[in-house]
Image (cartoon, helix red, strand yellow):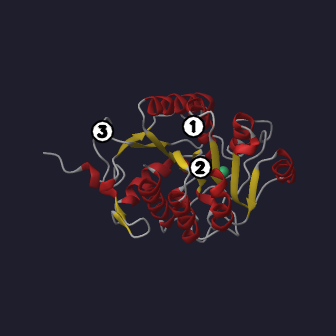
Amino acid sequence: MRFDEAYSGKVFIMSNPSYEESKAVIYGMPMDWTVSFRPGSRFGPARIREASLGLEEYSPYMDKHLEEVNYFDAGDIPLPFGNAARSLDMVEEYVDKLLADGKFPLGLGGEHLLSWPIFKAMYRKYPDMAIIHMDAHADLREQYEGEPLSHSTPIRKACGLIGPENVYSFGIRSGMREEFQYAKESGMHMSKFEVARPLKEILPSLAGRNVYVTIDIDVLDPAHAPGTGTAEAGGITSKELLEAIGAIAKSDVNVIGADLVEVAPAYDPTEQTQIAASKFIREMLLGWVK
Ligand SMILES: [Mn+2]
């Protein structure tokens, strides 16, 4: 006999073993090839799954139990080390398949550039989509040291793809002057420093819209999430991020998919970063998969 994999720490807690029956699919993207500072987020997905073992399956925030959501954990996409372009193609192809099968894609990073191929796949299916982005960094660079495939560029690429007026960034507290200028002039929305309050103000205007949500764990203060490559002082609490996830769940937006990126476990011997991340994933499953 084999013991229950749903409680093994190898898959996210309480995952359904059947892909076919699942509504949502958790998939890992173990890539950190383009990061500008400290690598290590390739180990994020595995550590988040492991940390999920410590979670309660019931959420008092959502008043829901994980058994009420049918999700499958696909494991990690076997991305080729060092080859960013081919890794991104593989992610795009994989998310295309999830969408063709009617699944809600829930991605675990890995670095933030991985959201770019996901945006492209989502946009093919949902040409009216908007993006909600929570992050310490604007990620609005066109390139980093001449390299357009960098984890500092995905939101700029998103603006080019779906139109800056459909991109909503929150919690931003770091970037080049040009990135903040672009945010001001392009017509995108950018809330600096805060997340929950401005998000709650914006959500009514997104009612009925298809919205993809990308969360960079470094939106949190390093006190709450030190395990990340480009930690940035002055961030929000994990309580505020939970509040933001809850506000989206209670709103009238239609969440079409999400990712949580940039967890780099090696910088956090207390493991609190992945423990917090696993809780955010639980809340996203309970609140956003309808
Ligand atoms: Mn980012």
Q: What is the three-letter code of the residue carrying label 2? A: Thr
Among numbered discs 2 and 1, the one appearing first in the sequence: 1
Q: What is the x, y in percent for residue 34?
A: 66, 41
Decide which of 250, 13 is in the foreground and name it: 250
Assess whether mark 1 and mark 2 are in contact (beta carbons under 8 angstroms).
yes
Q: Which residue is mark 1?
A: 118
Among numbered discs 1 and 3, the one appearing first in the sequence: 3
Among numbered discs 3 and 2, the one appearing first in the sequence: 3
Q: What is the three-letter code of the residue carrying label 1? A: Ile
Q: Nearer the viewer, mark 1 or mark 3?
A: 3
* 266 sits left or right of 285 in the view: right
Q: What is the x, y in percent for residue 148?
A: 74, 35
Q: Which residue is mark 2?
A: 214
Q: What is the x, y in percent for residue 252?
A: 55, 54
SS under mark 2? strand
Between the C-alphas of marks 2 and 1, the distance is: 10 Å
Decide which of 179, 189 is in the foreground and name it: 189
Between the C-alphas of marks 1 and 3, the distance is: 22 Å
Q: Which residue is mark 3?
A: 21
Q: Nearer the viewer, mark 3 or mark 2?
A: 3
Between the C-alphas of marks 3 and 2, the distance is: 25 Å
* 98 sits left or right of 146 in the view: left
SS under mark 3? loop
